[in-house]
Image (cartoon, rainbow, N blue to C red):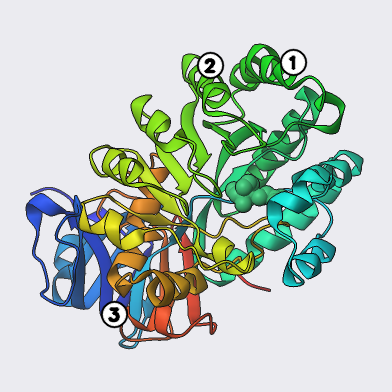
Amino acid sequence: MQEKRKADLVVTGIGQAYTARPAASETGSPDLSLKHSTFVPELISDAAVACGDGLILYVGGEDLVEKEVDTSDALIVDAEGRLVTPGLVDCHTHLVFDGSRHDEYAMRCMGSSYLEIAESGGGIRSTVRSFREADKDLLFNSAQARMAAMAFTGTTTVEIKSGYGLSTGEELKALSVAGRLAEEESLRVVPTFLGAHEVPDEYQSDRTGYVDLVINEMIPEVAKQGVARFCDVFCEKGVFSVEESERILRAGLEHGLGAKIHSDEFEALGGTEMAVSIGAVSAEHLTALTESGIVALAGSATVPVLLPGTTLFLGKGDYAPARDLLDRGAQVALATDFNPGSSTFMSLPLITTIACSQMGMHPAEALQGVTVNAARALGLQDEVGRLEVGLAADLVIWDADDYRMIPYAAGHPLVLFVVIEGDAVSFD
Ligand code: NIG
Ligand code: FE
C-alpha cells in the first residue's frame, strides 16, 4: 500500500470551501451562472484541506482526510464552519512607486480628466519624477507595507509592473525592488516589464527614439537579467499607438517575455485585437472595448482583465462590458490596478463588490475573476487560484459562511487567516 503523504497543516471544520474545477469534470451547482467557463466554480460542504511541503495534499469531505493523508504531526486549524477560498490573485498592479497624487485626484473631482492631467505633464510622468529620486530601500519599504495591506484582505499572489522609471537603469531599479520583494516577502510576486508606460519628459520630442530604446536596449537587458516574466505596454491615444505597441510586444516575445497590454482604457484603437492576434496572455482595462474586441477576446485564450476600481476612482461610469464578455464565453479576470494615479484600491474583495454591483457579475464570477482567471492572466493556472491537490497551499479562512459574503461585505475586513505555501501569514 502506498504510504500516506505527511501533512503539516490541516484546516478542518470548513463549512463551505469555494474553488473551481475544469469544466470537463463539472459537478456544478445550479446556483452558479458560469456555464461558458473552462473552469466552473465548485462548493464543497463540511470540507477539510490538508497541506504539506507548501502544496495542497487533500481537498474534500472532512470525513475522508485522515484516510488520505497522515495528519499525525500536522497543525490542525478548526475553521468552525467558516468559508475557505484559494488565496486571491491580484494580476494587475503598479505597486512599486514613491509619492502621492492626491492633488490630481482633487482636480479630477472638480472636472479635469485623467488624460488632460497627463497631457499637462502630470499623471504617470509626475510619478516618474518622484520614482527617479527615490532609492531602492525606500521603494522596497513602501511596497512591503502595501503588500502587507493586500495580504490582510486575502491577496496571496501579486503582479507588479515596472513603468515609473522609463530609462534602462530606472526600469531595472523597479524590477530589482520587485525581485527583492519576491525573495523576502511571503506573497508570490510576478514581475512585469512596463517600460512602455509613457514617453518620458526627455523623449517628448523623439517618441520613436524612446520606442527604439525600449526595443533595442531595455527588453534585451530585462530578458538577459531574467527579472520579468511579461512585457506590457500602455496602448492609448497620446501614449503608444497600436503599431508601436505591437513592435514592443513582439520584441518582448522574441526575448521570452509573455505579452500583456493596457488597451481600450479611454479610446478603442485596436490594441486588444492586435494583442489577441499575437497571442497575448491578457488584455487589460477594456472600458472602451468594441464589438470586434469582444469577439476577438471571446474566441481566444487571451484573458480580459477588468479593473472596475479604476473606473470608479476616476469618477467615470463607463465600466468594461463584463456581461457581454462572460455571456460570450470569455474568462474574465479582475484586479485592483493599484497605482498612485488611477486606482488606490488595494482590496480585491472590494473590487468584487464593484464588479457585482456595477458590472452585473455574479459573486461566483467575481470570485473566479480574482482566483482562477487571475491566475490564468499570469500563466499560473497550474500553480495557484484553486483548492486542488498539487497546487500551492495558498488559502484564506474568512469570517463568513458563504462565498457571496465576500462581495456583499463591501470591503469590511472578513479575512481571519491567510496561508501562503503552507505557512500562516502573520499580521503583526
Ligand atoms: O493602469 N493606464 C495606465 N497605467 C495605470 C495608471 C498609472 C498612473 O496613473 O500612475 C493604469 O491605470
Ligand atoms: Fe495599469
> Residue most toward the right?
133
Is residue 53 in view from this perspective?
no
Q: Is residue 280 above or below residue 354?
A: above
Residue plotted at (66% across, 11% down): 216
**Which label belongs to residue 209?**
1
- Mark 2 or mark 3, earlier in chain: 3
Side of 162 where 293 appears, left or right: left
Q: In the image, which is nearer the foreground, mark 2 or mark 3?
A: 2
At label 1, the amino acid type is Gly
Which quadrant of the view contains residue 203?
Answer: top right
Question: Is 290 or 371 nearer to us in this picture?
Answer: 290
Which quadrant of the view contains residue 13?
Answer: bottom left
The local crowd at label 1, few if under 14, some if 14 to 19, many if 20 or more residues have their Cα within 10 Å, is few
The local crowd at label 3, few if under 14, some if 14 to 19, many if 20 or more residues have their Cα within 10 Å, is many
Residue plotted at (32% across, 74% down): 363
Q: Is residue 239 above or below residue 407?
A: above
Side of 380 where 252 appears, left or right: right
Q: In the image, which is nearer the foreground, mark 2 or mark 1?
A: 1
* Measured Cα–Cα span from mark 3 to mark 1: 57 Å
At label 2, the amino acid type is Ala
Q: Position of residue 299 (x, y in %)?
A: 23, 39
The local crowd at label 2, few if under 14, some if 14 to 19, many if 20 or more residues have their Cα within 10 Å, is some
- Residue under numbered circle 2: 251
Q: Is residue 176 above or below residue 120?
A: above
Side of 6 where 136 appears, left or right: right
- Mark 3 or mark 1, earlier in chain: 3
**Which label belongs to residue 14?**
3
